[in-house]
Amino acid sequence: MPSTRRTDVVLLAVAVVWGSSYLTAKTATEATSVLLVLFLRYAISAVACVAVVAAAVRSSGPLTRDELARGTLLGVTQAAVLVLETYGVAHTSAANAGLIISLTLVLTPLLDRAGRGGGLPVRFYLAAGLCVGGVGLLVSGTGLRAPGVGDLLMLAAAVVRAGHVVLVGRLTAGRSLRPLHLTAVQSVVGTVLFLPPAAAGLPLLARTDATAWAQLLYLALFCGLFAFLAQTWAVQRTSPTRASLLLGTEPVWALAVGIGFGSERLTAAAALGAVLIVVGTYWGQAVERARRAERTPLAAAAAFPTASVSGGK
């Protein structure tokens, strides 16, 4: 298989895995508590990350103070994202969750430019308007109604995730920080944060069946560790634009998995809303990327982490 096609396949695999994480998290929270799911997801990921980092100490060196400090702060914001996402998906459909969280791609540039000079073109706000209209149709169900609790939590998760992504960019800019080491610190921080509230539910693990454990392992190792490392590997071998386009298919896969495997249904209005969200996020992302490219020839490459990271998976 040619290297370009192999890289595309890896990026699509990451998008599929992330898209499937919403249904997996939803079914996992039906088998056990949300807090226990969050703790185990972090704990399993932390064990795997720390093991990989420890094995690579001789070649890459130990954890630095910079990585520890910034990883700790990012671990707190990432934990906030996952709390909102997991509680949100527990109270809405996996398809809705995956589509609403994709608003991060439009919200991130807005937050990133807050307090900075230079606005975004009118086209960007038109794209954002499409997304807002799409969310309204998506959550309307069989008729116009107020968004449900789960939908509102996913909207909040999109805002917090966008803030997390901006923070990642600003904390890591111009610094020699290793992604795997930062991920390990964030995983440990999340484990520590969720252990106290989840401790009361730990005895329930004795009655957790093999299916629930498989879902937890999938969330931690595939939606977490594998997706992050695969994304890092692939982005180094392709253009930011191409990678962004492929990773941006995440909400499409969330919709497909929710309908295909979760027996979820989409009304005509909700289907139109899904289309508007996907079109709006792609359009807004393209406008923002072009704007950065106009400002400086190197900005298009630098924009990739801000424009397309799904930080917090």
Image (tube, helix red, strand yellow):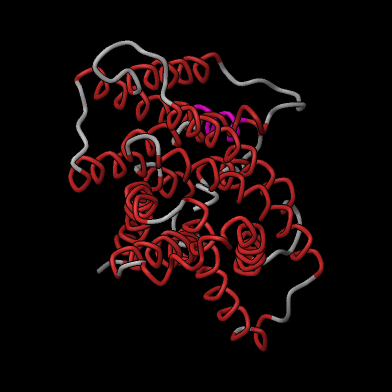
Residue most toward the top? 144
**Is the magenta region chiefly helix, strand or loop?**
helix
Eyeballing the image, is 41 above or below 52?
above
Q: Which residues are magenta?
A: 287-294
Left or right, residue 305 beside residue 148: right
In x, y percent, where is residue 246? Answer: 36, 47
- Point 36% across, 66% down: residue: 208
The image quarter containing residue 298 is top right
In x, y percent, where is residue 126? Answer: 47, 14
Eyeballing the image, is 143 above or below 281?
above
- Point 48% across, 42% down: residue: 87
Residue most toward the bottom? 58
Q: Is residue 292 magenta?
A: yes
Q: How many marks?
A: 0
- Point 34% across, 42% down: residue: 249
Of the pair 96 and 284, the residue shown nearer to us: 96
Left or right, residue 244 beside residue 116: left
- Point 33% across, 56% down: residue: 8
The image quarter containing residue 141 is top left
Q: Is residue 162 magenta?
A: no
Q: Split into 4 quadrants, where in the image is the N terminus?
A: bottom left
In x, y percent, where is residue 124? Answer: 51, 20
In x, y percent, where is residue 283? Answer: 42, 26
Of the pair 98 and 250, the residue shown nearer to us: 98
